[in-house]
């Protein structure tokens, strides 16, 4: 993807917001699948944080996609306790691991921007050493934000054109959960254009991110690779 220098300024505010995210609030993994585990007290598409406990007894199945390593872990049965970078297993839990490609592409700048020394990375919900950007090769991404126990009411999710001099609303919906999928019949998301997505709880709780669509990314189809995580 190639951007004019003027296209970059709409990203700076989002990048600054990302830098303020607290490490303690960063999830360890995304739960891609969770089956036959009525006592788990979690569900598919939840974040798994350090300290979370997931009960898979007697024969539940859990698939974790780790944000920091792109590693996929499938766990059957037993108990799971999330640690800083992985999961601790007990009570007979059985694990198998594999690697999957995840987002690594960089934002390309045109010659004018390079001469000026400009350098920008896609906004991310995590520190630079965890996940550098939110670039997707799907036109129907998922958007997820932290569940806010203190907030009451529905969440308004809005997508804006971040490349315009003044942000233009592209699409908006109301969600009753902490994630939502962009519909196949929604307004077309233009390839390479930066978009800002904002999830607003009633009153003061607001989360956002910047993302773009790049069909050239060679990524396998998976929930993690289709996910845009929003932060405060």
Image (cartoon, rainbow, N blue to C red):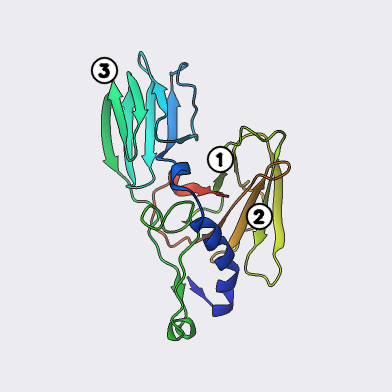
Q: Are marks 3 and 1 in contact (CB under 8 Å)?
A: no
Residue density around tag 1, few if under 14, some if 14–19, many if 20 or more, within 10 Å:
many
Report whether residue 136 is seen. no
CA–CA distance in space, label 2 to label 1: 17 Å
Q: Where is residue 110 shown, x and y percent of the image?
A: 47, 80
Q: Where is residue 19 shown, x and y percent of the image?
A: 49, 58
Q: Are marks 2 and 1 in contact (CB under 8 Å)?
A: no
Residue 89 vs residue 125: left or right? Answer: left
Q: Which residue is mark 1?
A: 146
Q: Which residue is mark 3?
A: 92
Residue 129 vs residue 182: left or right? Answer: left
Name the one closer to the observer, 127 or 160.
127
Residue density around tag 3, few if under 14, some if 14–19, many if 20 or more, within 10 Å:
some
Comparing labels 3 and 1, the label whose residue is closer to the camera: 1
The relative height of residue 93 versus residue 204 in the rendered view (above or below) is above
The secondary structure type at the circle numbered 2 is: strand
Report whether residue 25 is seen. yes
The secondary structure type at the circle numbered 3 is: loop
Instruction: Tally the numbered discs.
Output: 3
Q: Are marks 2 and 3 in contact (CB under 8 Å)?
A: no
Point out the tag, 2 or 3, that comes first from the N-terminus. Answer: 3
Q: Where is residue 184 shown, x and y percent of the image?
A: 62, 48
Which residue is drawn at the image coordinates 40% and 62% (left, top)? 105
Q: Where is residue 4 shown, x and y percent of the image?
A: 54, 78
Name the one closer to the observer, 36 or 113.
113
The secondary structure type at the circle numbered 1 is: loop
Which residue is drawn at the image coordinates 36% and 56% (left, top)? 129
The disc label shown at residue 159, or none: 2
Residue 174 figure quarter: top right
Residue 108 figure quarter: bottom left
Name the one closer to the observer, 155 or 211.
155
């Amino acid at each position: 993807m190639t951007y004019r220098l003027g296209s970059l300024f709409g990203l700076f505010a989002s990048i600054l917001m990302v830098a303020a995210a607290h490490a303690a609030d960063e999830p360890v993994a995304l739960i891609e699948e969770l089956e036959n585990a009525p006592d788990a007290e979690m569900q598919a598409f939840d974040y798994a944080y350090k300290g979370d406990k997931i009960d898979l007894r007697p024969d539940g199945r859990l698939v974790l996609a780790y944000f920091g390593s792109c590693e996929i872990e499938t766990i059957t049965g037993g108990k799971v306790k999330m640690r800083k970078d992985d999961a601790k297993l007990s009570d007979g839990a059985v694990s198998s691991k594999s690697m999957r490609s995840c987002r690594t592409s960089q934002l390309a700048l045109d010659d004018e921007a390079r001469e000026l020394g400009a350098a920008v990375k896609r906004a991310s919900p995590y520190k630079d050493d965890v996940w550098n950007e939110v670039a997707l090769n799907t036109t129907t991404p998922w958007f997820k934000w932290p569940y806010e126990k203190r907030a009451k009411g529905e969440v308004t999710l809005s997508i804006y054109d971040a490349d315009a001099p003044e942000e233009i609303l592209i699409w908006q919906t109301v969600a009753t959960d902490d994630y939502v999928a962009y519909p196949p019949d929604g307004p077309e998301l233009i390839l390479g254009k930066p978009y800002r997505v904002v999830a607003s709880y009633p009153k003061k709780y607001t989360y956002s991110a910047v993302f773009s669509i790049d069909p050239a990314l060679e990524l396998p189809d998976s929930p993690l690779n289709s996910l845009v995580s929003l932060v405060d």
